[in-house]
Every structure is written in structure tokens, then in C-alpha cells.
Amino acid sequence: MQGLLRHYNPVTAVFVVLSLTALAVSGMRPVFVCNEVITRFIRDGVMVLALIIPITAGMGLNFAIVVGAICAQVGLILAVDYQLGGLESLALIMIVGVALSILLGYLIGLCLNRARGREMITTILIGFLATSMYQLIFMVGYGTIITPRNPEMMLSRGVGIRNMVDLDRFRNLLDSIWVLRFGEIEVPLFMLLVVCFMALGVNYILHTRLGRHFSAVGFSGNRVEALGLDPRLIRIKAIILSTVIACLGHIIFIQNIGMLNVYTAHLNTDIFSCAALLAGGATVTRAKVRHALFGIVLFHTLFVVSPQAGQNLFGNPALGEYFRSFVAYGTIAVALVLNAKNSDKLPRGPWK
Amino acid sequence: MIVRARHVPQMVIAIFLCAMAGGALLLEIPLPWVINDALVRLAMNGVLVLSLVPMLNVGIGINFGLPVAIVAGLLGLCLTVNWRLTGSLGFTMALALSTVIAVCLGEVYGRLLNRVRGREEITATFIGFSFIPLTNFFWATAPFTNPAMLWPIGGIGMRPTIGLKSYFAKILNTWMPLEIGPLTIPCGLLLFFGLCCLLVHLFFKTTPGLAILAIGENEGYARLCGIDVDRMRRLAVILSTVIGAVGICVYAQSYGFIELYDAPMMMAFPAASAILIGGSTTGRATVAQVVAGTFLFHTMYVLSGPLANDLLVPEMAEIFRLMMTTGVILFAMLHHGGRHARPSETL
Amino acid sequence: MLELRGISKTFGPHSALSEVSLSIAAGEIHGLIGLNGSGKSTLLHILFGSSFIHETGGYNGSCFLDGKPFRFTSPAQAIAAGIGMVHQEFALIPEMTVAENILLSREKGFALTDTLFPRDFSLLDPRKNDHEARRALEYLDLKIDPRQKTGNLALNIRQFIEIAREISRDNLRLLLLDEPTAVLNTADAGNFLATLRHLADKGVAILFTSHRLPEIRGLCDRLTILREGRTVGCCDVRTASLGAITHLMLRESVTKAGRFRSRPTDDPILTIRDFQVAMAGEELLGLDLDVQRGEILGLISLSGHGKLAFGAGVIGQLPFRGSLQLDGATNPPSSSAAMIARGVFFLSEDRNRLGLLPRHSIMDNIAFSALQHDNRFLHPSLPRCLRLPDRRAIRRHGERCIREFDIRCTGPAQPVGELSGGNQQKVRIAHALTLSPRLMVVNEPTRGVDIAAKERILDMFLAINDRAGTTIVIASSELEELRRVCDRIAVLYQGRLHAILEPTADDLLFSRAISGKPVLH
């Protein structure tokens, strides 16, 4: 009980109450909600895990996981362009995506080392900038500078890729493995295991030498330099890992949906992932894998039921929609305000 | 070296502008139209950009929470339209109401920002972002009665865009126009913008203004000199909010429409970009920088549209603007970080 | 083994070390002694390759380890070369456990994952780490559980952990210790010094800074004395007397005659009793002091003994406990604004952070507080509520101050950030005087100031005191200067008043008082 109280987090408590209330008001069938939540757990789970390492390394919420998502999309578009399909090419997409995320993650790390103390706002801006560069390449560059091999995915005017690219060669490639059914509840066991495996992986990294160095940098910043560690390099490694995990997470996300919204699929992944993590009880200075897993379930329960709850309560589904985005942004705002009191502990002087 | 590095955004923008001006000449886009549009856009957006000045100067940084101020202004505008006040009376009323609402919102906003020392910018961003869906809730349910503002079917909830034609659209734009050949200079609009600039400039000459500048420069020293830092920071936030609210009124009358719902969400970024292009760092801004920055930024804006249309891809203009906007802010962030990375002092 | 030749280091215009030379043999314990600001820590940081040395322009001179020259640019290089350092401001991470701290950057992983994965991705073996940490702690005869959080431990234990971390390195050859005994009590210190002796016998060279003279004499083989960044002596401990070392440490030459005037006593402007201020590293733990109206009172102590906390507590920069009586009013509201309104002004020692508005002009800096608090310099022909200042009056006042205090500048509109340290200090004093305070508390007024400006600043204090009768409290580590301007000098030791001496008192008496020895009147 005492332990429970110590770990009490007002954000989580509010989420639990809200989710349950909204579930009751919406009148949706728990089985349906359960299925939806499982699907979303698989879709978004890995993305949320990507946030944990930068928080441990003291850089706060990494909104630049959008860049990882972009890397995944680039890999997928290339695969569609070369008309590849099947599991082997999914592996190829991962390799391309991961390679690109390592490169971009390194660049983001360099930027963040220049912006110490305001990493979060910088990652938001990096996300925006990456989005517009990505749009520039695929909306303008394709068909003018880059010659497409697959004309089906191009807009009719010959320049730029269509908004929606069908990924029928990849759709549910992984989700259909080992699907179990309990009554009406469908459990794609393989994908659940993949998410859990990634969660274990992140947990593993946190307990390795590198993970220890992440938390040392997170706790003491540049002071660890005196202990022979290179804080700049460690921070860069944290961001690279985060970007790579985000890239893998987005590949899972897209193959689950089966369609690629070329210009919008990656938007808001950062916001929703951050909100989910914070809902699970993490703060901007401290996050654990269990926060991520718990947070996804809580956040997406609320997400699934709130439009219907809005409809039932006010007769207007749009209100539920507003409530949903308010929850996403508001969670982050509240977490930032609440967490402000992590006062710098001053070293105590000699005679005490 | 440092001086040169600091001016990279300005140089890029200048080169960009020159290239675009060349393109405009080639494509025979009429010059008077460009100048005219640029002037209108300067004054139309200038007040919003100006609203960033107090918070920059007190050391909070860029006000990414500008949506808070904009919502205050929108509320003032909507109330005025709801009461069917037109003409200059309507506009004045809108300004007055916006100011009152902005003072209240700014007080709360300022208190929140005082709690998050050192993380104001990111917190402000999310206060702004989360304020939008909250107000969407309000717009969708608010008991306004003027049918011109409501959805035609059902009569509940505001329309996303409300035309101001029969109220006070372009009231400043058409006040005292000065025609020189093919040019029409909107003197009234420019005058109003100039007045706002002058007031802000004068404010930073008064003792509270000087105290705000001192806090921005050296907060610890200001506190040691007996200045109530929290109060002054709140004052700066309130001022920023009030000016922002006035700014959206000016913008709306010039545009001719009130835009509700998600429209204000991303408005902070172009404004921030404009003030940074003007040469202010993320620690200090002057009115001259506001004017110069807004002019450069929006001339680019005016030119890029028709140019991209004449090229193959019309979306390119928007993408380029976005890239410019975020690129400039990002550059300022990184550069500021690099310049202020003071070596620790241990002796 | 280690040799330093002609090491010089400047921070901006201020010189921290000039032409320091030093040599240490293997197995030698070498003491480095000097007052606060004499450059001891800077020297250690140079050896250890701390990044701020590199970032502030590096240093001149050359260092040799076993005859090979070296110049480290990061502590990682120094550690690889076998140099360890125990920091004055702890380099422990309070949120981590003892074992984690001791083994940071040398963690032990499971053998399996060590071979399977790259080094960084090897899973850590908590049992092996605990064992390693326990071994290091046992070496120091310390019986604590290595699994507890470091932040919860007492300060002396933390100091031992810091030392355990350094000496558990296998390749340790040179150990740098920055004031390691400052937080230890006598018994702990004895234990600790024995460990050092043991370590030295194994061939590790130790460079040790301290201002506890007896300790250094008991432990070290040789001793280098630094004063104002210069080596002023290097001697064998056995041959030098305590008096001679103190003398070298404090000053070389006999000062000019002090200003000593008898003042009417017992009209205190400020009375404090059991005054406690929790200033990090400079705590006051119960000071009882009367400041008499119209006097100049000096406060002296070694660093860390609380002289700087006095001003911060009185002005309300930091909260205090105990009682404070100002002009008969007991415990008035303690905020800078309220204190300034009561005629108290404080000049902090931290000139860079809390000193000035560097981008503002000289005249604006001087007029700043008077404009904010006294409504002075407001435009006479405009309504007061507009609160617009009279630029011309400000400029005139600025020009007068520049003339009167001999501020070297291009004019009153020059930004103060461009001025030298001494002139900045004059601007700060002019700023304070514009408020015409009745009590001024000044911390370290001459730190980082060149000789000429130093004289000028001391003269300013005398003149203010004479002309306006302003009471001045000067907290400084420069005994010589205090003796020249003060009427009385209070010596603090361990956060309490130790003695009040006449400025004319004997040198030896001062050095005894400063190091906490009983003083007989």
C-alpha cells in the first residue's frame, strides 16, 4: 500500500478515472474495446518504447521520433517503388530504415548537444523540419529529379507521390501469424510477442553498461565528464537508439494498417506516444518500460471510447474528438507543469 | 566569425528574396501588386510578431503559446459580432473586449509559466496546443446567437470561418488609403501598426520596462536589486497576450474572416520565425527587428505563392514556407545554445 | 615522476596561475597549499584535463609524466593515463547506489554477454559489481552496504566513497585530491590520512590541496605554497616552521599602516544572534555579531567557513534562521526590496552572475536601482505615473560618477560588459551609492581586480565612510586589504564567530584565529 502511494502519479490516476467513466458513458461492448486496444497496443507500442532511452539520458521527451517514422516511410516507399513484397523485403525495408535512422539520429544528436537545456522544443522543431523536407522530396522531388519506377504510385500530373499508397504486398504480413481467438477476442500472439520482445530489449539496454551511462548522464549531465565518460557521445547514442526503435515501431504500425498515408501517417506519432507514456506514470525525467506498456493501454482505451462517449453525452461526436486531442496535448502540458519542481539539489557544504 | 554565423538566416533569406525577385521579374508578376501586398501583410501580421517582444525581453523566450493570446482576441471578435456591432465602433469594441479577456488569460498563463522556470518554451508550446481543443469544445457549444456565425443547419456551434464583411472587415485597410500611381498604400493600417510599435517601444523606456529588460539580461542580479521578478515576468506575459489579442483582431479585419477551431494552432511559428529573421536572438528583441523581420518574411511569403504556381507544383510554396519557418527557429535555437554554453567556473 | 614547468592559465583578463612549476616523485605525497583563489584547484584541473580549462583557452607551460610530455583535453585521457582525482565539489551521482558510483565507467558485465555483444551492450552483473565495490570499500575500512543510494549517506561517507572510486582503479599512479579533508572530522581524517600513506607506500604519487596546515605538515613529504597564482615557496615539510608557511601563504611584505580609529561603540545598526544561513559550501551555523553604526567591519575566514553567507542572509537572497535586528526593528521582512527600502545594500561576490547588467550602459547600470526604488531620475516635465526616466539626468549622474570614481571607459554610454573587472566593480559601487544606503555589505570587493583599481576601490570605501557615514561590512579573504580599511575585523571559523581582532593585531594572531586556534586577548 505504501509502495502504491509512493508511486502514485496524479496523471495516471486521472487517466484511470477518465477511461473508466468514458467506457461506462460510451456504452461500448468491452470485447470490442478490448480488441481495439490490443490492435493499438501492437501498432503504437514500440513507438512509445522509443521515448524511454532519451528520458533516461536526461533529454526529456524526444519529439524527434517523428524522424524515425519518416525513415520507416522512406523505406516503405522505396520498396513500393521497386515493387518488392513479402517477408524478405520487409527485412530489407527494416535495414534501409534503420540505416537511415542511424544517420539522421546522429545528426539530431549533434543538434541536441548544441541545445542543452532546451532539447524538447528543439526536437519538436527538428520534427517539423524533417516533415517538410520529406514532403519536399516526395511531393516535388519525385518525378522531377528522381525518376519513379512504379508509375502507379504517382499523382496523375506526373510529379509527386499519391497521398495514399496501397501496401497490399505487406498488409498484415506479420499480424496474421499465430492469431489466437478467445471467444470474440482476437490475439495476434506473434505481434504481441514482438512488442514484448522490444520492451525487454529496451529494458535490457537500460541494464547494460551503456544504460548505466545513460542514467549517469541523465542524473548529472556534463558533470560525468569528470568520471571519464563523454556525455556528448552518450547523448548521441541515446538519440540514435531512440530513432532506430521509432523506425521499427513505425514499420509495424504501417504494415498493420496496410495503407501508407504518405504525407500524414507520421504526423502526431510523437504527441500520441508521449502522451501515452506520461499517462502510464512516467515523467519527463523518469520513465520505465512498465510506464510505457501500462500507458498505451490506458491512453488507447480512452482514445477508443471517447468519440462514442462524446456522442452519448452531448449528442456530438466532434466533441469527443476535441476531447481526445485535448487529452493528448493536455497530458504533456500537465506533465511539464507538474514536473517543474525537480529543483536542482545544491551540494551541501562542509559543516553539516 | 560569430557575427557572421549569427546572420546566416538573414543572409539566406536575402539571397532567397533576390532569387525570387528575379523570378518574379522573369514571370512578369506586377511589381506594384507585390509591394502593395507586402505592405498589407507587414501590418496585418506585424502586431502578432510584436507580441513576442515582451516575453523575449523578460527572458522567457519565444512565446510558442501564442494561441492563448489569439483565442482571447477571437473571443473578443466573436462577442462583438454576436452583438452585431459594426464599423469602427465594432472594431474598437472588439479591441477592448479582447484586451480584457487577454489580461485575464495572460495572468493565468503567466502564473503557469512562472512555475516552469527553464522549460518555458516547451511548456508554452503545449499550453498553446492543448488550449486549442479546449476552445474547440467551447466554439462547438457556445451560446452565441447571431446566425451569421453559427452552422446553417442545426444552429448550434460556430462556423470555422466567419465572414466580417457586414461588420468591420478591412476597416483599417481602407482607412486613409494613399494612391501613388498604381500603388495603394494602406496608410491607416500602417499607422495603427506604427502606433502599436511606438507604444511597445515607449514601454521599454519606462521603469517597469527597464526592469523587464534587466530581468531578461540577468535575473539573479535583478532579484538582488529588489525587483519582484515573478510579478514582472507575469506583467510581460500579460503584455504579450494583450498585444497578441490585438494582433489577431488586426489580422482578422484585414483578412476579412474570423478563423476558429484549429486555425490558430500553428500561428506562433511564422511569427517566431519573422522576429528571428529580423535579427533578434532568443534573448532580446527590439521593435525595429520586428518590423524588418516581418517585412522580409512576408515579402518572401507574397513572392513564393505565384512563383510556385507558375512552376509545376503549387504545394511547393507551402512546403518551402514551412521549411523556412522551422529552419530559422531551429537555427536560432542551436546557435543560441552554442553561444551561451558557458564553461563552468571553478576556481 | 610528474613534472610541471611554467604552467600559466588565464580566465579572460584574469590570471589564475602564472609560471607554476612543480615536481613529484613516485610514492611522494606532495602538499599544495594556498588561500581561496590562489589557483590550487585550477592547477589540479589542468592536470586532470577538465573540459572547462580547455574551453577557456587552455593553458601555457608543459607537463611531463615519466619524462613524456602530456596535455590532456578530457578527463577520460587522464584516467587512461592513470591519474585519478577527488573533487572538492563531489563528482558522485546521488541518485545512484554506492556500487554504481564506485564502478562507473568500469562496470563488470556477465561473461556471456561480454563475449556475445559489443562492450557497451553487455548486461551488467550486479553481484560482481557489488563484490568489486565491497572490496574497494574494505580497503578503506568502510563497512557500508554498496547497494544503498549515495544521496542518503552522510557527507564524510560520501567523501570516502569518492576516494574509494579513485583508488580502486588498477592503473592508478597519480592521485589528485582537492580539499579532501574539508568535510571529515578529526577521527575520519586520521583514518583517511593513514590510507593515503599506505597508498603512497605502494608507489602512488599524491598531490593534495588543503588549507588545514597541521594536517599537511603531518602527512606530506614536500609542500608547494601558492599565492595569487604564483609559487611563492617550495619546501621540505620537516624543515619549515608553521609560522613561515602561514606567512608565505598570506602575504609577503609588511603592509602600510592600517587605518585605526576609535569609534563610539554600542550603537549597533545591525545586531544578529544565532544567525544561520544555508549557503551551499559557505554555511553560517549561528553567528552572533553587532555591526556598529558608522564603522567599517571586516569579515575574514578561510573559504567554506561562512563569511560570504553573511551578506546573502542579511539582504534576503537566502533565507536565514535566528534573529536579525536592523535599527531597532527585529526581523523585518527579509526580501531584497524591503532591505533596500531600509537602506541596506549588498554587493555579491559573484560579479559575473550577480554583478551587473553587462549589455546595459554604464549610466543605466548606475541609475538602475535608484530609478526602480526611489523614483529618482524620472522625467520632471511628464506625469510621474508614466514613469518615463529623464535620460539627461541619468547621463549627468553617470558622468559625475565616472569622474568621481575614476572609471576608465569611453563614455557613460559604453556597455559595462566591455569594462575591465576593476572598473566594473567601481560601477557596482557607484550603483550602490546612488541609493545612498546606510549599511553596505560587500563580498570580495577586490577579487579579480588589478592593483591600481584595488587601491581606488579601497579608497572609495574610506571616502564613503568618512563623508556619508555609511556603515560598511567587507567580507574578504585578503587580510592585507581588510587591515588597511577596517576598524574591526571579525574572524569566522566553521560558520561561527571566532574572534574580533584589531586591524593592527599581530600576523601570527590572525593566522591562528583563521585556522581556528584559541586567541588570547
Image: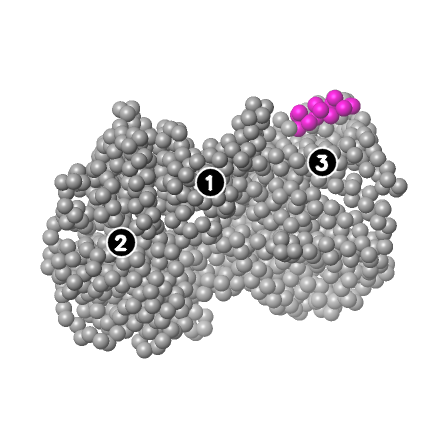
* Image spot of residue B194 (x, y percent): 53, 59
Q: Secondary structure at mark 1?
A: helix
Residue in the image at 38% along x and 28% along y: C171
Give above or below for C267 relative to A181.
below
How packed mark 1 is, by other alpha carbons closer than 10 Å (few <14, some 14-19, many 20 or more), is: many
Examine the structure image and report whether residue C87 is included in the region drawn in magenta.
Answer: no
Q: CA distance from mark 2 to mark 1?
A: 30 Å
* Image spot of residue B152 (x, y percent): 84, 59
How packed mark 3 is, by other alpha carbons closer than 10 Å (few <14, some 14-19, many 20 or more), is: many
Q: Amino acid at mark 2?
A: Leu
Q: CA distance from mark 2 to mark 3?
A: 60 Å
* First along the sequence among labels 2 and 1: 1
Residue in the image at 43% along x and 44% along y: C143
Give the residue number, with chain letter if any, for mark 3: A195
* Image spot of residue C442 (x, y percent): 28, 61
Q: Are marks 2 and 1 on the same chain?
A: yes
Which residue extends farthest bottom? Answer: C328
Q: Secondary structure at mark 3?
A: helix
Q: Are marks 2 and 3 on the same chain?
A: no
Give the residue number, with chain letter if any, for mark 1: C101
Q: Is residue B204 visible?
A: no
Which quadrant holds residue A129? top right
Q: CA distance from mark 3 to mark 1?
A: 33 Å
Which quadrant holds residue B307? top right
- Residue range (magenta): A85-97
Write down the chain letter for disc 1: C
Residue in the image at 45% along x and 50% along y: C153
Q: Nearer the viewer, residue B246 or C478?
A: C478
